[in-house]
Amino acid sequence: MLRNFKYKFRTWKKNLTPNNTAPKAGDESDKQVLSKNLSVNLDLVRKKLGNSMDLIIREFNLGNTRAALVCLDGLVDKEIADTHILQPMLIHARMAEPTPVKGKNELWKFIKDNNLSAIDYKEVYTLDEVLNKIISGFTALLIDGLAAALVINTVGFEARDVKEPETEAVVRGPREGFTERLQVNTALLRRKIKSPDLRLERMTLGRVTKTDICIAYVQGIANDKIVDELKKRLQRIEIDAVLESGYIEAFIEDAPFSMFATVGNTEKPDIAAAKMLEGRVAVLVDGSPMTLTIPYLFIETIQVSEDYYSRWLSGTMMRWFRILSITLTTQLPALYVATVSFNAEVLPTILLITIAASREGVPLPAAVEMLFLGIIFEILREAGIRQPRPVGQAVSIIGALVIGEAAINAGLVSAPAVMVTVLTGIASFTIPAQSITYIFIRLLLLALAATTGFFGLILGIIIVLIHMASLRSFGVPYLSPLAPANFGDWKDFLFRAPLWTMFSRPSVIGWQNRKRTGAFGMPRPPKDEEKKPAGEGERE
Amino acid sequence: MKKTAFYALLFCSILLLPGCWNQVDIEERGIVAALGIDKAAEEGKLAVTVQIIKPGEIKAGGKGQGGGAAGGGEAVAVYTDTGYDLFDALRNLARQTGRKLYFPEMAVLVLGEALAREGVGSVMDFMVRDAEPSVRTWVLVARGQAKEVLKTPIPTEKVWGFGLGKMIKAIKAHSKAPAVNVLDFLKNVDSTTTCPVATGIQIVGVEKKPKQEAVTPSKRPVLGGAAVFKEYQMTGWLDEIQTRGMLWVKGEVKGGIVVVPSPQNENKMLALEIIRAASEIKPEISDGRITVTVKITEEGNIGEVKPDHIEIAKPGVIEAIEAGKREVIENEVWAAVTRAQELNADVFGFGEAVRRKYPREWPQYEKMWGELFPALDVQVKVDAKIRRTGMITNPEKPGESGVK
C-alpha cells in the first residue's frame, strides 16, 4: 500500500498547478520558509494552528541538538511514531554515538540513512508544507539549526472497516466495499487489478478541506482523451470544500440540468475495476466510499455486476426484468391514467368492469388519485430512509395501514390505483442508483397522460428519448450502443452474451485497446485421443 | 436561456391547452353490453334498447355488501328509447341513463325481425362509422322483438349481454347457427353476389315468477338458425338443419353431433362427434353452363351408441356408419342449397368462387347471377370418416367385455 504513495507523490507534484492547491498571492505567510531556529518554527506552527488542543509537540535531545516531533492527536498512529521515529532517535542515536556526527547536515543525513525506520517520509522546506502534512496525519521532525523538516507518514486514524455496502448488495460476487479512507480504497483497486499499468494519480481539491482525490485508470485501456478531459475538468474546479464525491460530480458532469446523471458512482471495488477494464476512469475521493466512474452511459443502469458473475442466461433474464422494471416504473401510472380516463377500450372487458367497479364512489379523478398516491409513496420511501431506526416499525405500520387498508376501505382511493403505485414503487427499487431520475420521468409522463391520454404519454416518451439521445458523457453518446446503433456492442446490451463471445471491449469507450478474450474461448469437452484423425480411415 | 424558456412554455401549453378533452373516467361511462334495435310503433322511428352494466353490482356479488336494491340487484340495467335513427335514439337514451353510453365493450347487436326485414343499412353504417363500436360485435336477429332478448335474464351470467356473446362462442359445440360479426356481415354486403347471414335467436317459454326464474329459467333466449339477408334487407330464415348445411359448404363447421341411423337397426340412432371438417367449392364452366361441385371432408368419432344391437368391432360396420353419416351430411347440404335457391340468396359464396376461378368470364355472369343461382347445378360430394370409437369399441353388454 505504501508503495502507491510514490506514484501519488510523483503525480501530485505534476498536477500541482497554481490554480488548485497553491496559495493565492498575498498569503505571504503560507510561503514562509522554515527558520533555522527550532523554537521559532514551533511557535509558528502553534500560531498557525491556533494553539489547537490536538497539537502534540514532543521536544527531545539528539545528542546535544534540540529536536521536536510535531503531529496531531488522533490522526497519527502513535505506535508507529513511538517505535519507528522516537525510539530510534532516542536509543539508536546514542548507540551510534562512538562516531560523533559533525555538523547539522551530517546529523540530518545520519537520521535519514541510519536512524529512521519508517518507510515513507519526505523532506520539506516551507511551513505551509509542514502544516499540510501534519493535518493529513503525518509527523514532522524539526531539528534545531536546520531550515528543513522531515515529514513521516504515520497516518493512522480511526476508520471504518471494509464492509459489504448496503446500497449495492449482491448474491454472488465479492462483498467488500470501499471505505472512507482513500488509501484503503486505492489498495482495494490495486488488489483487483494487479498490473503496473494501473494508474493512480493524486490531486488535492478544496481550498479549505484540502481533500485528496485520486484518478484511477488502466493505462493502455482507458481512452487518453477521456483521461485528459477529466483532468482538465478537475483542474477547473474551485471550491472550498469537497466532503463527498458528489461535490466533484456536480462540477464535472456534462449536462447539469438534465434529469439523467452522466457520471456514475459505485461503492464496490469490483464494479469500479470492471468499469476501468472497459476503459472507464474512476475518481476516488478521500472521505467517501462513493467512487465516481466516467463516462456513464444509459446501459450501465441495466448492467449489474452479478450479470457477469452468474451464467449468461440468468444475466440475460435479469437484465430483461430490469428493462421491464424501468418501463413499469416510468410508464405504469401514466398508462393507467391514460387507459382509465381516455382510452378504456384497450382494456379487456372483464378488467374494465373490475376497475370501473372499484373506482365507483372514489372521490378523486384517476389522474389526481394516481398523483396523490405516488406522492404518498415517495414520502413513505423517503421516511423509510431518513427515519431513526427505532421508529422504523411505526412508519411501516402507519404506511401500510393508512394507505393499504384504511384508504381503500374508506373509499378514498381505489384498489387498482394502490396496486399500480406499489408495483411502480417496487419496480423502481431494481434500479436504486438512478431512481430519482425515473420518479421525475414518471411524474412528467403522468402529467401528460392526465391531460392528453395516450397521445401525451407517447409524446412524453418521445421527448425523453430525444433528450437522452442528445446527451453525451465525456464525449460518448449517452444512449450508445442503442443510438448511435453499434451492433457489435449489443453483446452486452439486451443480452449478456457468454464471456467467451465478448472478444472485445465496448467500442465507444475502449476503442484504443479492444481485445478482451481469445477468439476461440468456447469451453468444449476434450477430444477422444483414441480416435484417429478425421479422414485417415477413408484414404485406405 | 431564452430558447429553453420558450420550449418550457411550449411544453406547458401541451398540459393546459387540450383541457382534458375527451376525458371521462371509466366509472362515469355507461358501459353497453348489448344493443337491441326494433321498429318503433311510431312510423319511421326506431326503438333502441341498451343493456348497461352496473359495475358496482358485479363487484358486490361475492361479498354481498354493496347493492342499493334489495336482494342484490341485477348487474345490468335495460333502457329503451326511440328516435328517428340509431344515433338519435342513442343520444335520447342519455336522458334516462344519465351517463354517456360507451360501446367498445358491446358484445352483441340484436336486430328485431321486423326491422331486419325493412333493412338495417343505417344501423350497420353507424357500427362502422362511429369510432366506439367494435366491428367484432356479434350480429343476431331476433324472431320477434330485440328488446325482449335484451330483457331476458341469463342466470349463469351477471351481464346478460356477455351471456349472449358466450352462446355464440359455444356454436362450435353444435354448429346449428352461424357466428357472424359486423365485419363478416359487411364483407358479404360488399360482394355483388354473396348474401350475408346473421345468427338467429328467439325467446322460448313463458315468464315464471321471479323467485323461480333464477333456478330454472323457462323464459330464455335460445340460439339457432340463420337470418338470410339480401344486402341490408332480410329475406328469410334458414332452420337449424339448413344452417348447418350452409356451414358445411362454407367450411365453418367446427364441431357438433351428426345423428345417424344405425346400419344394423334403422330405428336406433348413433351420435357421431364431428372433429374436423373442411370444404372446397369447385366451379366449372362448360358450354356456358356453370356447375358447382362442393367437396366436403369430415372426420369424426363415435360419440354415443345404444347398446344391444351393434357390434362396432365387426368388419364393415364402421364403413357402414360412415356411409350413413355421408348421407346425413349430404341431406343437410341439400336442404341448405334448396332453401337458398328458393330464397334466391347465394349465402355460400358460389358466385365469388366462380369469379375467382373465371375472372374473365365472370362479368357476363355477374349481372344475371340472380337468374342463374336458383337453377344452379350443384354437385355435393362428401367424404366422411370415422377415426376413433371413443374409449371403448363395442358397447357394454352383460357377459361381454367391451372395456379393454
Image (cartoon, rainbow, N blue to C red):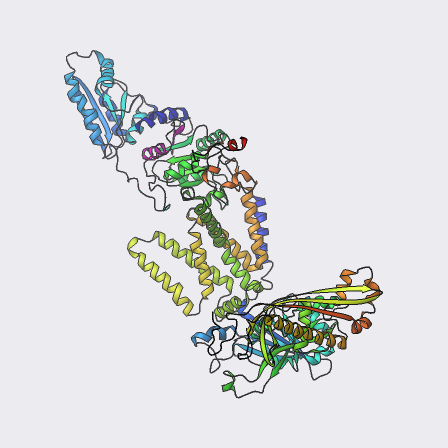
Q: Is residue A196 magenta?
A: yes
- The image quadrant where one finds the N terminus of chain B is top right
**Residue shown at the point (57%, 46%) measured from the top left:** A466
Q: Is residue A106 left or right of residue A531?
A: left
Q: Is residue A395 magenta?
A: no
Furthest residue to the bottom?
B209
Q: Is residue A66 left or right of residue A271?
A: left
Residue B122 appears in which quarter of the rendering? Answer: bottom right
Residue B302 on image: x %, y %: 56, 72
Q: Is residue A378 above or below residue A467?
A: below
Q: Is residue A451 left or right of residue B185?
A: left
**Residue shown at the point (78%, 64%) measured from the top left:** B284
Q: Is residue B357 above or below residue B168?
A: above
Q: Specify whether residue A113 is in view.
A: yes
Residue B110 on image: x %, y %: 64, 76
**Residue shown at the point (58%, 75%) measured from the top left:** B271
Q: Is residue A354 above or below residue B241?
A: above
Nearer to me, A204 or B160: B160
Nearer to me, B27 or A132: B27
* Tally of marks: 0
Residue B382 on image: x %, y %: 68, 69
Q: Specify whether residue B86 is in view.
A: no
Magenta stretch bounds: A181-207
Residue A518 on image: x %, y %: 47, 32
Q: Is residue A163 left or right of residue B300?
A: left
